[in-house]
Image (cartoon, rainbow, N blue to C red):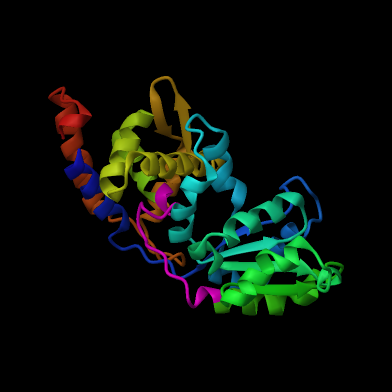
């Protein structure tokens, strides 16, 4: 199993290159029309160059499946994964949920370095828990950035927000490969392509071997990837296992060709692995014996 996992990982990430700044965008819920978070998501990549400069990931894409799903992963256990996988955590401080996220992230040293907190300028001088708690901590430790902005005209604040993002991202480091929770879907997509239908337990084992992480972390990586691929309608899940949809197959082949995103699969290696897998299947060998 470990040998197969590493072979797939090598083929999936051999030519991987992604120079975009990865941003986890937090704030009001995704159903709140006109929220500051929603406006930032629209304005941030408005110029063509910025569309290739940023990768925006909404917090619920990462956390919802893990906190509410079968694994019931707790937030604290996910912090280290998140800290390793993003460049910037951008928090629009506009809701109770965003305040809670700021409290959790600012109390974690590795996450605190990656915070860009956008705060309503009206509350800059308030004697509040927020100002004397997490924002004071960020100021005292000189970690992360705080942007006091006009929430009635957030478009006019984008230059300051982009500047803060750039300053934080320049000091950030993130790994590539399956151990990166944002990029793990590439590996899982490859595994499904090669082994469909594949059951969740086998996927988790493959991710565990390829990432060299403990099973709990591997499960978080796998389920997050499955959530991303399901949202994109690239996979279907049935009692038989997980399989690619026609859209998922198209996505796989698109990732196997050079393009502006800068990452490509090694399709020749993929085809070689698939032939070996088919030979094993014809000999009625189980996945765990590979």
Of all residues shown, which one is farthest toward the left? 283
For residue 45, say whether it is visible.
no
Q: In the drawing, does residue 22 fall left or right of residue 255?
A: right
Residue at point 75%, 61% (across, down): 129
Of all residues shown, which one is farthest toward the top? 239
Residue at point 16%, 22% (across, down): 284
In terms of depth relative to the viewer, which is nearer, 265 or 72? 72
Span colored in magenta: 168-185
- Residue 161: percent from left, percent from top: 68, 74
In terms of depth relative to the viewer, which is nearer, 206 or 142? 142
- Residue 86: percent from left, percent from top: 49, 62
- Residue 262: percent from left, percent from top: 41, 66
Quadrant including the C terminus: top left
Residue at point 63%, 64% (across, down): 90
Q: Is residue 184 magenta?
A: yes
In the image, residue 10 above or below residue 120: above
For residue 84, say whether it is visible.
yes
In the image, residue 224 above or below residue 82: above
- Residue 204 falls in which quadrant of the image? top left
Magenta stretch secondary structure, dominant: loop
Q: Is residue 198 magenta?
A: no
In terms of depth relative to the viewer, which is nearer, 277 or 139? 139
In the image, residue 215 above or below residue 289: below
In the image, residue 68 above or below residue 59: above
Quadrant including the N terminus: top left
């Amino acid at each position: 199993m470990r040998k197969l996992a590493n072979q797939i990982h090598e083929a999936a990430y051999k030519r991987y290159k992604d120079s975009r700044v990865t941003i986890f965008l937090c704030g009001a819920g995704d159903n709140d029309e006109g929220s500051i978070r929603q406006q930032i998501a629209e304005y941030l990549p408005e110029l063509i160059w910025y569309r290739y400069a940023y990768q925006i990931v909404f917090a619920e894409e990462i956390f919802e499946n893990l906190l509410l799903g079968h694994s019931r992963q707790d937030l604290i256990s996910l912090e280290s994964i998140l800290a390793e996988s993003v460049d910037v955590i951008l928090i629009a401080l506009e809701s109770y949920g965003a305040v809670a996220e700021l409290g959790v992230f600012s109390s974690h040293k590795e996450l605190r370095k990656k915070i860009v907190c956008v705060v309503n300028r009206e509350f800059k001088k308030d004697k509040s828990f927020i100002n004397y708690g997490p924002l004071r901590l960020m100021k005292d430790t000189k970690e992360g950035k705080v942007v006091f902005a006009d929430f009635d005209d957030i478009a006019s604040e984008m230059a300051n927000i982009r500047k803060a993002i750039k300053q934080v991202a320049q000091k950030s480091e993130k790994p590539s490969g399956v151990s990166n929770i944002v990029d793990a879907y590439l590996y899982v997509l490859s595994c499904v392509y090669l082994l469909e239908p594949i059951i969740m337990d086998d996927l988790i084992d493959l991710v565990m071997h390829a990432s060299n992480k403990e099973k709990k972390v591997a499960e978080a990586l796998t389920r997050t990837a499955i959530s991303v691929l399901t949202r994109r309608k690239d996979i279907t899940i049935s009692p038989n296992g997980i399989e690619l949809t026609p859209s998922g197959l198209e996505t796989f082949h698109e990732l196997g060709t050079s393009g502006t995103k800068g990452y490509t699969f090694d399709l020749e290696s993929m085809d070689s692995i698939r032939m070996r897998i088919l030979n094993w299947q014809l000999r009625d060998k189980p996945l765990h014996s590979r």
